[in-house]
Structure formats: structure tokens, C-alpha cells
Amino acid sequence: MTRLNRYVPSLLALACMACAAAPAVPQWPPRDELARWEPVPGVSVVAPRLPPGVSETANGTTRVSCNPLRAPDTTAWPYARLDRVCAWEHLNFSRQFRLDWYPDTFEPGTSPEENLTRLEREAVQPFARNQYTRLPAPWMGWEWRGLGEGQIIRDRWIVVGTGLLFLQAISVKEDPFPEGEAFLDSLRVTAVEPTAR
């Protein structure tokens, strides 16, 4: 037996102890809190559920709300058409999901590609400059990933017929938050639209 072979079991034991001592990354949202939501007819995501008939709730760690916009937004296109805001937040982990719906944002009869170009020119490019990418098919949309003040931010703008859908996942820099990716990727559009999947 070589000298190295005598030390291998000890090194493996130390490595296993280090793995066991590392804190587990908390999962949020827990699987038992998840539900497929359809806050907009034909548009759904997987996120923490709200009790039936309730538009806002909070427990010790999670705040969930899904409301029509109470006051009109007077900012520039397309944000002036904001109709519904759904937000999910874990207070202890500084993790957030968001879904905004802007109906009738694009003129009827324009092509999805024309709508995508207008969205890029008037909303995405002024915000994200050249740091955004086009979403893969079947989505007609754009994605920006960046850093805010101590945060990781993932934004998606998606053309849905004549409407605009905005999805966002936010967490602190030290917490890449894989559940945020799952939220973004859970989107389904079941309405009969050119961008449906």
C-alpha cells in the first residue's frame, strides 16, 4: 500500500464532513405551496397559491397578491396600459416573482414580428441598451439579466397577441435562486394566439 493510499480514506472523510456542515440552500417556494395560476385568461404560471376568492394574503414568510391595477399608470407606452399585477415575495430570503399584464398594447392587425420590433425599440432597448437577448421560439419576446443594487434581476417581455406580458424574478446577489428560473420557465399561453405554446 502506497503512502497516498493510506491518506485517501481520511481525505474522503474530511470532504464528507465539509459537505455535511454546509448549510442547505432553502427552497422557495416549497412544493406544497405551488399551484398553476391563470391570473389572465389563457396565461398561467406556477407560483405560490392564493386561497380561493382572495386577492392578497401573507403568512410569516410569504406575501402573495394578484390584483387589477387600482390606479392608472400614467407613464409612457407600453406601461400606461398596465392592467394586472401579480407579485410573490419571500420576506426572509429577499426572493420575488412578478407578473404584469398589459392588454391591448399593440394595434390589431400588426404582425407579431412588428410588435416585437416596437417592443424592443420603445421599451426594452431604452432600459437594457444592448444587454438583452431574444427569447427562443415559441416566444416572441426579450430577456434581460443583470444586477441591481445588491440584486440579481431576470426580466422577460413577451408579446401575446395584442397584449404584453412581463415576468420578473429577483434575488440577492449571493442567492442565484433556481426557483426563479422555474417560475420564468413555467409560463404557458393556452389562448389561441400566434405565440401560443
Image (spheres, helix red, strand yellow):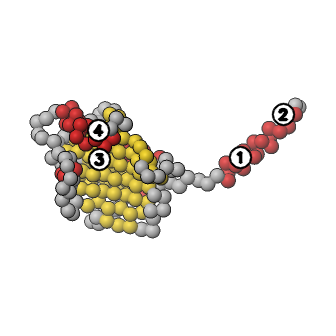
User: How many residues crowd around disc 4 within 10 Å: few (fewer than 14), some, or many (20 or more)?
Assistant: some
Provide the residue designation for mark 2. 4
Residue 182 visible in the displayed image: no
Q: Earlier in the sequence, mark 1 or mark 4?
A: 1
- Tell me what residue is drawn at x 26 percent, y 46 percent: 165
Residue type, numbered disc 4: Gln
List x then y, in percent, for residue 105: 17, 45
- Tell me what residue is drawn at x 88 percent, y 31 percent: 2
Look at the numbered discs 2 and 4 and tell me whether their residues touch, using CB distance below 8 Å: no
User: Which labelled disc corresponds to residue 125?
Assistant: 4
User: How many residues crowd around disc 3 within 10 Å: few (fewer than 14), some, or many (20 or more)?
Assistant: some
List x then y, in percent, for residue 98: 34, 53
Q: Regarding mark 3 in the picture, which secondary structure is present there?
A: strand
Provide the residue designation for mark 1. 16
Provide the residue designation for mark 3. 166
- Viewer-proximal residue, 196 or 84? 84
